[in-house]
Amino acid sequence: MSLFSRPLRATCSVALLLPAFLAGCAGDKQPTKFAPLRYDYLSVMHLNAATLNIEDATLQNPVVGDIGNRAPTPPTQALRQMAQDRLVATGVSGTAQFVIDRASILHKAGGVLAGQMDVHLVLLNSGGTQAARAEAHVSQTLRPDLSKGDADSQANLYELTNDMMQRMNVEFEYQIRNTLKDWMTDAGGTPVGSAIQSQSLDAPGAKSRTTATSTLPAAVVPAAATGVTSAPALTTPAITTPQVTTPTITTPTVTVPTVTTPNVSVPDATSATTLPENAPVAETSGSSTSTGNAASAKNSDPDPVFPAGEDDDASPSTTTKARSPAPGVLQLPKK
């Protein structure tokens, strides 16, 4: 007779197998499908080159301990996809060469994942000589979520790869637009590094207007790759044409002072006649002045013509009498 009944043995078996069954269900919670990493929704960068080559240099320089190839989308594949979606050769000569220098994920001590991506883009002229170069570098660490499985599970590797690619898209576009701006074109192949200016040929003094044209698109910050269905709209910055104003020249007013002619007082020209001492003096009857002068001319010497003198009773004559000077009075004029 058996020590335990059959129902009891069945119950014990179920109790022993239940923990193993529950552990198996917990391991199936992590997703088994991951969206592919694509970047065709971001802005396209046109290069002044005839061809575009993509080279994976990690094959010749592998990193020891790299586990990036275990990710649903390995980092090297994500970088190649970025170059294919965002770089376009629209020139007529030369070669654009995109090189993946490093794309690795390492499992560090403490369960930390460390990723690093290094790429560069060179432009070669028709003779194969390097004409321009741009580089972009991104590094990031991730402390894995153990609820998604082990530290190096596909979910954690996918998350780290996606985060690094978002930063790489921003850094790579910034380096291209700043370092290789003279080697970029529009979709039709026209260089956009220099603006075309036009100037009015008006007459001198007229207002002139200069117009500048630029086709540089605004910088785009990439969003998460998962769940994106359409590309974001690009906004072209508006360019305001400066108005050139010709200054008005004002002629200063010159005030001419009034010149006043001074009044000059001219004294009366009264000529005083100076007679020599021995000049004869004329007398006129009826003139008191002549009489006074004749009287003063008398002296004590006798008159040679009338030694006895004139008769006092004689009436004055109206004729002028001339008298001879006294002897010894005549003198020669002085020189």
Image: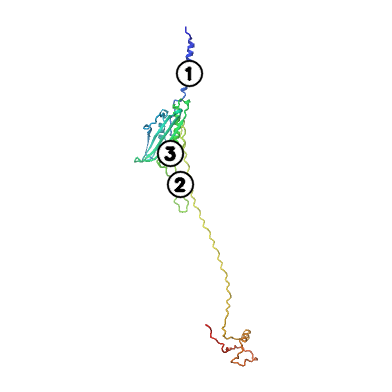
Most extreme residue toward the top, as rendered?
1
Which callout, 3 or 2, points to the residue nearer the camera? Answer: 3
Q: Quadrant of residue 300?
A: bottom right
Q: Quadrant of residue 292?
A: bottom right
User: Which residue is at 48% across, 13% downward?
Assistant: 12
Task: Classify mark 1: helix, strand or loop.
Answer: helix
Residue 111: x and y in percent read: 45, 27
Disc 3 packing (10 Å; few <14; some 14–19; many ≥20)? some
**Of marks 3 and 2, which one's residue comes earlier in the chain?**
3
The front one of 171 and 326 is 326
CA gap, disc 1 and disc 2: 77 Å
Q: Name the amino acid, label 1.
A: Pro
Which callout, 1 or 2, points to the residue nearer the camera? Answer: 1
The front one of 247 and 102 is 102
Q: State yes or no: discs 3 and 2 in contact (Cβ < 8 Å).
A: no
**Of marks 1 and 2, which one's residue comes earlier in the chain?**
1
Q: Which residue is mark 2?
A: 211
CA gap, disc 3 and disc 2: 28 Å
Residue 175 is marked as: 3
**Of marks 1 and 3, which one's residue comes earlier in the chain?**
1
Picture mark count? 3
Most extreme residue toward the right, as rendered?
313
Residue 152 is marked as: none
Q: Which residue is mark 1?
A: 19
Q: In the rendered view, does 298 fall on the left or right side of 153?
A: right
Q: Name the amino acid, label 3.
A: Gln
Q: State yes or no: discs 1 and 2 in contact (Cβ < 8 Å).
A: no
Most extreme residue toward the left, as rendered?
127
Residue 286: x and y in percent read: 63, 86
CA gap, disc 1 and disc 3: 55 Å
Task: Classify mark 2: helix, strand or loop.
Answer: strand
